[in-house]
Amino acid sequence: MTAIAFVGLGNMGGPMAANLVAAGHDVTGFDLVSEALEKAAGAGVRVAGSAAEAVAEADVVITMLPSGRHLITAYQGATDSTGGGLLAAARPGTLFLDCSTVDVADARTANTAAVEAGHRAMDAPVSGGVAGAQGGTLTFMVGAEEADLATAEPLLNVMGGKVVHCGGPGGGQAAKICNNMVLGASMLAVSEAFVLGERLGLTHQALYDVMSTASGQCWSLTSYCPVPGPVPTSPANNDYKPGFAAALMAKDLGLAANALEQTGVDALIGSHAAEIYRAFADSLDGEPRDFSAIVESVRERSGQ
Ligand code: NAD
């Protein structure tokens, strides 16, 4: 079995690592937060004392970190309490598989640093949320050389249900950013429709029953409905506890906005969604809130 180091055992990384253990892999994990480590240990992950210690004997290093800054610090930073030093501590030829959502430029920087340090590297961000991580049904969007994807594929198939090869390094992140630009915009559109429906005297259920079988149908409605009731598993029924935090959606839309600027693409809706989610995330002042709670800010702005 492959010796795996898993760095970043949060909402997504924790259950992904647990699924690898359940499939019989030897997984050594590290996180900066002791609560995450305890939870992972409960799922059978062997806990290391530092990020560098976690990767020392690994064949594959999987990272699931909040942002590009965290990724680059983990790869190249000092081997201290900031959780850095992965590239220096791993054996030459280790495969570095990053599943975090980061900027395309950061993904390519991290990839180049890994290759220059004598390793193999690929990006494989995911879609499917915490439920997909728990159920092993994530979709992986892969930016990799063919040979590296072949090595990683058995592990990706444990953690996910679909693997799409999007091109060379950075290709996975490019696809992820495009997808999440649609997700942010569609969640806003669905939320605005529900608030308009409320004003016009429609029940949530009636509007859901129409839109879910009409041309307004989309994932933000049928899997992640932003109002309580119609989709019992959506965070709206759990006081908007994440799920997928508004701060992470603001981050992803910010990555899309950077890419729009760099490429000169004039995407009015994507840019506006980035601004709206940034303002919403800032207004939460660190409170963990699901991105579908944006419906509350639409109501607030509408004087409801
Ligand atoms: P999270 O904040 O729950 O987990 C990230 C973990 O990384 C934290 O526990 C943090 O302590 C740890 N960490 C940070 N730096 C570290 C370091 N140097 N060494 C070890 N651990 C370190 O976030 P999450 O929801 O699990 O998301 C992780 C990534 O997955 C993000 O890039 C996010 O955009 C992406 N993502 C999340 C979802 C979702 O629904 N939550 C869906 C798709 C993609």
Image (cartoon, rainbow, N blue to C red):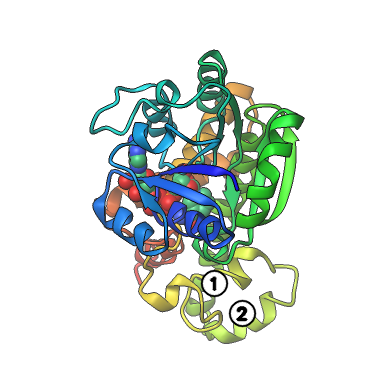
Quarter of the image with the C terminus is bottom left
Calculate the distance from the C-alpha at mark 2 to the C-alpha at mark 1: 9 Å
| Near-viewer residue (127 or 302) | 127
Q: Is residue 24 above or below residue 254?
A: below
Pointer 2 with pointer 1, Cβ within 8 A: yes
As drawn, is 152 to the left or to the right of 66?
Answer: right
Quarter residue 104 falls in? top right
Which numbered disc, 2 or 1, marks the residue that appears first in the sequence? 2
> Circle 1 sits in a helix, a strand or a loop, which is it?
loop
As drawn, is 262 to the left or to the right of 88?
Answer: right
Residue 52 in picture, x, y percent from top left: 36, 31
Circle 1: is it few (<14), some (14-19), or many (20+) Cα within 10 Å?
many
Residue at horizontal 34 percent and vertical 61 percent from the top: 39
Residue 216 in picture, x, y percent from top left: 69, 68
Quarter residue 79 falls in? top left
> Circle 2 sits in a helix, a strand or a loop, which is it?
helix
Q: Amino acid at mark 2?
A: Tyr
Residue 111 in picture, x, y percent from top left: 56, 23
Circle number at residue 261:
none
Residue at horizontal 46 percent and vertical 55 percent from the top: 12
The residue carrying mark 2 is: 208
As drawn, is 90 to the left or to the right of 300?
Answer: right
Label total for image: 2
The residue carrying mark 1 is: 225
Residue 275 in picture, x, y percent from top left: 44, 42
